[in-house]
Amino acid sequence: MLCTSMLVGRDCSVEACALPRYVEIYVTKNGVVVDTSVVVDAFDEISNNNASSKRILTWLLDNDVTIHMPTYSIIEVLCALRNMKIDKRNMTNAFTNKYPLRCKYIDVDAEFLVEYFVPDLPYIRAGDYIFLCIANKLHIPLITNDLGLIRISSKCTFPVFSSEDAFLQFSE
């Protein structure tokens, strides 16, 4: 199991579904899937979701919640950080040293297709579909700031939260 880190602080902003309080216990035991958009927004000081992304990542860290992500999401985050005002030489350190989150990375390979792929999930772009497949297979919530994923959340059999709504739901 690899560990990764995120730059996180505190504050909030977005929409999703409301679930009962027991979800916090379920999430703490089984983890969550975190979409790359949340991690990128935590670094992006001009993002409307910056504060809420920092807040939920801090909560996940403080509560030792396992984050499930496809392995390729590391590259997505690092590519996004390249475009931000982060010292290129320290980009990997910014991503891995400040707040070590407990992450379980899932390889997207032939085994993934057999174990995780579900053809009848709501249609969305392939990269986002992988996050849906992981949340569906593990029966755990997905946290995202991607409006397309939030839009189709009502068609999912697992909860999909924005970073703001995840924090409000889990930290009650």
Image (tube, helix red, strand yellow):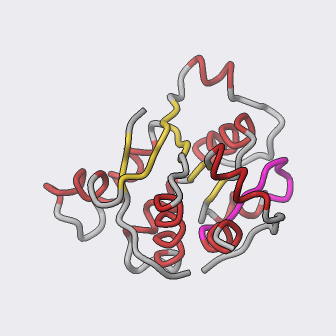
Question: In the displayed structure, would residue 43 be above or below residue 71?
Answer: below
Residue 26 screen position, x and y as percent = 72, 50
Q: Quadrant of the C terminus?
A: bottom right
Q: Quadrant of residue 16?
A: bottom right
Question: In the displayed structure, would residue 109 be above or below residue 86?
Answer: above
User: Farthest residue in the left direction?
Assistant: 89
Residue 61 screen position, x and y as percent = 46, 58
Q: Residue at x 17, y 57 (%)?
A: 90
Residue 159 screen position, x and y as percent = 77, 55
Q: Quadrant of the N terminus?
A: top left
On whether residue 26 falls in the magenta region, the answer is no
Q: Which residues are magenta?
A: 153-163
How many numbered discs?
A: 0
Question: In the displayed structure, would residue 127 be above or below residue 164?
Answer: above
Q: Residue at x 65, y 43 (%)?
A: 30
Q: Residue at x 53, y 47 (%)?
A: 67
Q: Residue at x 59, y 65 (%)?
A: 145
Residue 88 located left or right of residue 2: left
Residue 142 located left or right of residue 110: right
Q: Quadrant of residue 19?
A: bottom right
